[in-house]
């Protein structure tokens, strides 16, 4: 089931965020950064105007989607608990994003070292642009775009 997130979900969202980051950064994970408490950030983001957060849940939260609204939507976060990779949760969350997008253009950033994410988004029509910003371990974040 996918539903709108509430402030009560912030702790579980933060836990999935931390676990998924550890999985995709692997040996490049900055342990100091990884130790930061992300719950306050997610409490703020879930409540902030101009943003939408959805969670997937079965017996517990399994993943989440976070979107910044605007002329071009930004898919800020789409994370799944690493133990549940490959079970369709990310696909279901992306389908929810497509409903929100309603044919409008969208952008996201992908850490270029995250092969799983790049394959996931490419399979759904996203294309890498030439826009980058500095990233972890000297590997950039690349802006991807999904056209109308």
Image: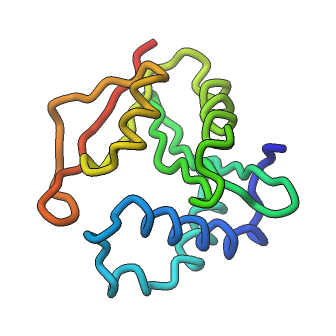
Q: Residue furthest left?
A: 138
Q: Say whether residue 93 is left or right of residue 126.
A: right
Instruction: Provide residue 112's location: percent of width, then percent of height.
Output: 25, 46
Q: Residue at x 62, y 60 (%)?
A: 83
Q: Residue at x 44, y 84 (%)?
A: 36
The answer to whether 94 appears left or right of 24 in the picture is right
Return the residue nearer the eye: 134 or 22: 22
Residue 100 in which image quadrant: top right
Name the residue at the right extreme. Answer: 59
Write down the quadrant of residue 129 in the picture. top left
Q: How many marks?
A: 0
Rendering coords of residue 21 (x, y %): 43, 64
| Nearer to us in this view, 6 or 77 | 77
Residue at left 29%, top 78%?
Answer: 30
The answer to whether residue 38 is above or below residue 2 is below
Residue at 65%, 39% in the rendered image: 93
- On screen, residue 98 versus residue 129, left or right, reads right
Which quadrant is the N terminus positioned in?
Answer: top right
Q: Position of residue 98 (x, y in %)?
A: 61, 25
Q: Identify the colour scheme used.
A: rainbow
């Amino acid at each position: 089931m996918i539903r709108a997130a509430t402030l009560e979900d912030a702790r579980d969202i933060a836990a999935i965020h931390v676990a998924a980051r550890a999985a995709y950064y692997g040996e490049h994970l900055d342990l100091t950064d990884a130790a930061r408490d992300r719950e306050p950030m997610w409490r703020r983001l879930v409540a902030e105007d101009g943003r939408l957060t959805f969670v997937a849940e079965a017996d517990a939260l399994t993943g989440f989607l976070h979107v910044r609204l605007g002329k071009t939507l930004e898919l800020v976060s789409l994370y799944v608990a690493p133990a549940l990779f490959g079970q369709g949760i990310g696909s279901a969350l992306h389908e929810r994003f497509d409903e929100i997008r309603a044919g409008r253009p969208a952008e996201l950033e992908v850490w270029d070292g995250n092969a799983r994410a790049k394959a996931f988004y490419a399979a759904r029509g996203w294309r890498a642009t030439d826009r980058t910003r500095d990233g972890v371990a000297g590997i950039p974040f690349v802006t991807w775009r999904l056209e109308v």
